[in-house]
Amino acid sequence: MAISLEKGQRIDLTKGNPGLSKMMVGLGWDPVSSGGGGFFGKLFGGGAPNIDCDASVLMLENGRVTENKNVIYFGNLRSRCGSIEHTGDNLTGEGSGDDEQIIIDLQKIPAHINKLIFVVNIYDCVKRSQHFGMIENAFIRVVDMANRREMVRYNLKEDYSGRTSLIAGEISRDGGEWKFTAVGEGTNDTSITEVVKRYS
């Protein structure tokens, strides 16, 4: 059974799983149901607009993104080293389960990369006047690809009203081990470019 974390908690991923190499990090969210519009609203485009959230990974070297290629998102789906692969963009967040998935091969991560930051931001949030108060059931989870076992889950339960980006969690190298931290920090960054500036 997956270990459920609260904000700020950290867990060692590799210590109890010495053979762990390939992981899937799944991120999910749902638009808050508006309750209005009904069938005809949906048919004719009424009700709440779709919220296009995008998951990204920042590969950090000593706390910094040292090159643009180290940002993995819908416009750059694979890291140069082949250790991280984004499976693609989900435009609406509808449906249950993961909305976006990122596959990580720990063995291929270059030695100088010591932290992976997982971010979700709302595409075109300023023009669409959208924020994370319009999103519910957000989570990040880590799955061992060898046996499809969910190892860790963190449900982001805070009120993120007015926030336009979410730093969901991070995986960091600690000596020979890899650890996951539940971050859950909302920011006012309006794009992945602005989030990256925090680490430049």
Image (cartoon, rainbow, N blue to C red):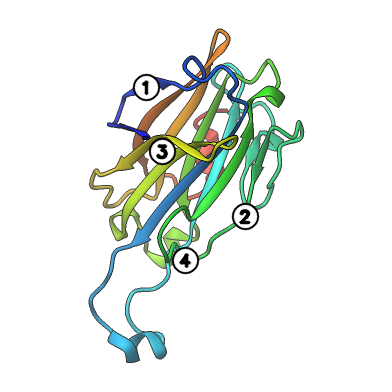
Q: Whole-Å distance between the Cαs marked 2 and 4?
A: 13 Å
Q: Whole-Å distance between the Cαs marked 1 and 3?
A: 13 Å
Which quadrant holds residue 115? top right
> Residue 100 versus residue 50: which sits nearer the camera?
100
Q: Residue at x 42, y 66 (%)?
A: 94
Q: Whole-Å distance between the Cαs marked 1 and 4?
A: 30 Å
Contact check, label 1 and label 4, Cβ < 8 Å: no
Give the SS element for disc 4.
loop
Q: Is residue 170 left or right of residue 106?
A: left
Q: Residue at x 52, y 48 (%)?
A: 55
Q: Which residue is mark 3?
A: 168
> Residue 153 versus residue 45: which sits nearer the camera?
153
Q: Which residue is mark 4?
A: 92
Q: Residue at x 53, y 52 (%)?
A: 100
Q: Indicate which disc residue 10 carries.
A: 1
- Could you tell me which quadrant the C terminus lies in? top right
Contact check, label 3 and label 2, Cβ < 8 Å: no
- Could you tell me which quadrant the N terminus lies in? top left
Contact check, label 2 and label 4, Cβ < 8 Å: no
Badge 1: residue crowd in 10 Å (few <14, some 14–19, many ≥20):
some
Q: What type is the residue that disc 4 sits on? A: Thr
**Residue 177 placed where, x, y %?**
54, 13
Give the SS element for disc 2.
loop
